[in-house]
Amino acid sequence: MIQISDAAQEHFVKLLSQQAEGTCIRVFVVNPGTAQAECGVSYCPVEAIEPDDIRIEYNGFAALVDKDSEKFLVDAEIDFVSDQMGSQLTLKAPNAKLRKVADDAPLFDRVNYFLQAEVNPQLAGHGGECSLMEITEDGFAILQFGGGCNGCSQVDFTLKEGIEKQLLEEMGDELKGVKDMTEHQRGEHSYY
């Protein structure tokens, strides 16, 4: 899953020798599968190891990956490079972010990518998200809101003045508009 160069392995062994016995490294992805995905490496003391962590043994240490990050770290590479400017760890994880779809991809895929890459990061700041459920034959994108958007008094404004305007600017020749299928009445399903 994760390729760690010999130089990086030596570096980790050196760093871990200064930590409490049993400490591993943890490789993780924050916001996996989104355009804002960030990869990182940290120490993981014994008491922070989770039962469902994936343990990968290397020469002199172990790396841990949480279950949620696993598929986003496929083909990841960690290296330790030194040059005249100093040395640093580099982590490349080509599957961490949401993969851009081609301009000629099906409309559903392009709208879904736009929602995941552009809209959901904005909604996440308010604890919300939206999902594309379908595109109707008459050209409307049907969305389902969740999280902080469910029960929010501003969801209609967000839908029409935010999401719909942006989508029509990008794909107005193929879409007529956006509709919401979320049940927004107050109840047990509401976020707040």
Image (spheres, grey):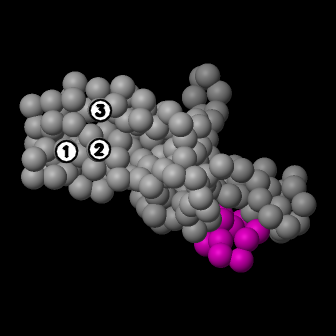
Comes first in the chain, label 3 or label 1: 1
Q: Dot 1, crowdedness within 10 Å: few (<14), some or many (≥20)?
A: some
Compared across the picture, whether 14 is left or right of 86 comes to right
Compared across the picture, whether 120 is left or right of 45 comes to left
Where residue 80 sits in the image (x, y, percent)?
59, 43
Please determine whether, in this image, residue 86 is positioned above or below residue 6: above
Residue at mark 1 to residue at mark 2: CA–CA distance = 7 Å
Res. 82 visible in picture: yes
> Residue under circle 1?
140
Q: Which residue is drawn at 27% across and 40% down?
A: 178
Residue positioned most to the bottom? 51
Residue 165 belongs to magenta span? no
Residue at mark 3 to residue at mark 2: CA–CA distance = 9 Å
Q: Which residue is drawn at 29% across and 44% down?
A: 179
Specify the amino acid type for callout 3: Glu
Q: Mark 2 and mark 1 in contact (Cβ < 8 Å)?
A: yes
The disc placed on residue 179 is 2
Q: Which residue is drawn at 71% across and 58% down?
A: 25
Which span of residues is magenta-colored?
49-64
